[in-house]
Image: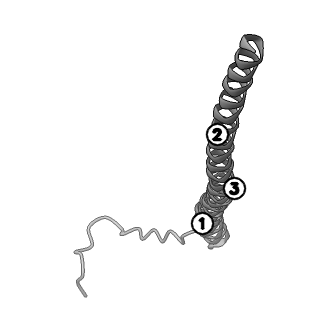
Amino acid sequence: MAGLAQCQREAEEVTELMKQNFARALERDGRLSDLDSRAQELRAMGEAFTRSTRAVARQQRRGQRRWRLAAIGLVAAFLLLLALGLALWLSRPPPVIVTVTVPPGTPPGGD
């Protein structure tokens, strides 16, 4: 009978250990579920961050492109005005030089 009592105690110890292991497994499962939900939230936040950084980068590229086009337009306008001014300056008739010779001994402006 002593062997039966010892087997009974060992069976109860094993049962208790199994209950503790099961409780720990349930606890781990709860923690894993929390970690999984946090990971999903972080993934969603990361995707939103990626979308927003792409949008900001796109806006910056557009702004830089606008400034570049504005600078090119200003330079083109300046060059056009310079070419137009140069063309007008070169196409004007040469100045007429009038030389008046006054014979010696004639009073200036006199009759």
Query: Which x, y percent locates residue 42?
Result: 62, 50
Q: Name the residue under label 2.
A: 23
In primary-sequence order, the first of circles 3 and 2 is 2
**Mark 1, mark 3: which one is toward the viewer?**
3
Alpha-carbon neighbours of circle 2 within 10 Å: few (<14), some, or many (≥20)?
Answer: few
Q: Residue at x 26, y 67 (%)?
A: 105
Q: Is mark 2 on a helix, strand or loop?
A: helix
Q: Mark 1 points at which residue?
A: 70
Task: Give the amino acid type for the residue marked by disc 2 in the picture.
Answer: Ala
Question: In the current view of this chain or complex, which residue is farthest to the front?
Answer: 1
Q: Is 92 in front, or is 99? A: 92
Q: Name the residue under label 3.
A: 47
Alpha-carbon neighbours of circle 3 within 10 Å: few (<14), some, or many (≥20)?
Answer: few
Q: Residue at x 76, y 11 (%)?
A: 3
Is residue 6 shown above or below 45? above
Is residue 78 shown above or below 37? below
Is there CB contact under 8 Å for labels 2 and 1?
no
In primary-sequence order, the first of circles 1 and 3 is 3
Structural distance between the alpha carbons of marks 2 and 1: 70 Å
Question: In the current view of this chain or complex, which residue is farthest to the bottom?
Answer: 111
**Mark 3, mark 2: which one is toward the viewer?**
2
Of the numbered discs in the image, which one, if any, rests on residue 48?
Answer: none
